[in-house]
Image: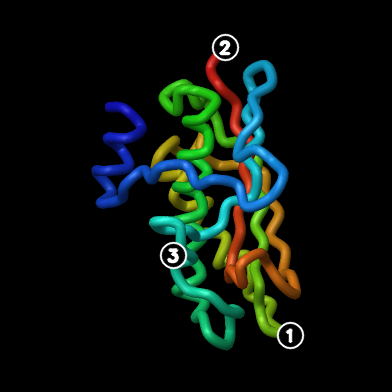
Amino acid sequence: MSLKEKIESLGLTLPVAALPIAAYVPAVKTGNLVFVAGQLPLVDGKIVKEGKVGKEVTPEEAKEMAQVCALNALAAITLVADIDQIERIIRVGGFVNGIPGFFAIPPIINGASELFIKLFGEVNGKHARTAIGVAELPLNAPVEVEVLVQLKS
């Protein structure tokens, strides 16, 4: 089963890669690694829901948006490589735009991590990770996710 078919079997859709909003590219391939720029929870070019986690956005909504970010990261990879050639998710970096004092950041980034584990399995889907709370994110997004993947040789 292709990765796109696995995504669809979960009731999800692989989106079209979003255009960058500044002076960068969505993904860079070097050797058998692909570095994906931070992806926002964009659907059809718009943030799913703007605001801070703990105020305008619930932690549950933010976790779902982290999954959207992960799907957008896979879409960004399609610009430089065949996603069916992804061997392993190496690293995920997650950023959460929360209210002051909001510390429940790791469960939100689990939205991305859990999707990768479902798609690539325990061995190739589990990854190193950073989950950071930030004061603001571009476009007032509640969450942003960046990814590093290894392609098959």
Q: Which residue is mark 3?
A: 64
Give the residue type that dot 3 points to.
Answer: Glu
Give the residue type that dot 2 points to.
Answer: Ser
Find out whether the residues at labels 2 and 3 contact each other: C-beta distance under 8 Å: no
Q: Which mark is residue 153?
A: 2
The spot of residue 117 in percent (x, y) is 46, 44
* Mark toward the start of the polypeptide (2 vs 1): 1
Q: Which mark is residue 115?
A: none
Q: Is residue 86 above or below residue 98?
A: above
Give the residue type that dot 1 points to.
Answer: Pro
Q: Which residue is mark 1?
A: 100
Seen from the viewer's position, the closer of residues 103 and 22 is: 22
Element type at mark 2: loop
Q: Give neighbour class at mark 3: few <14, some 14-19, many 20+ (Cα, 10 Å).
A: some
Find out whether the residues at labels 2 and 1 contact each other: C-beta distance under 8 Å: no
* Mark toward the start of the polypeptide (2 vs 3): 3
Find out whether the residues at labels 3 and 1 contact each other: C-beta distance under 8 Å: no
Residue at 44%, 65% in the rendered image: 64
* Distance between the alpha carbons at the discs numbered 3 and 1: 21 Å
The spot of residue 103 in percent (x, y) is 69, 77
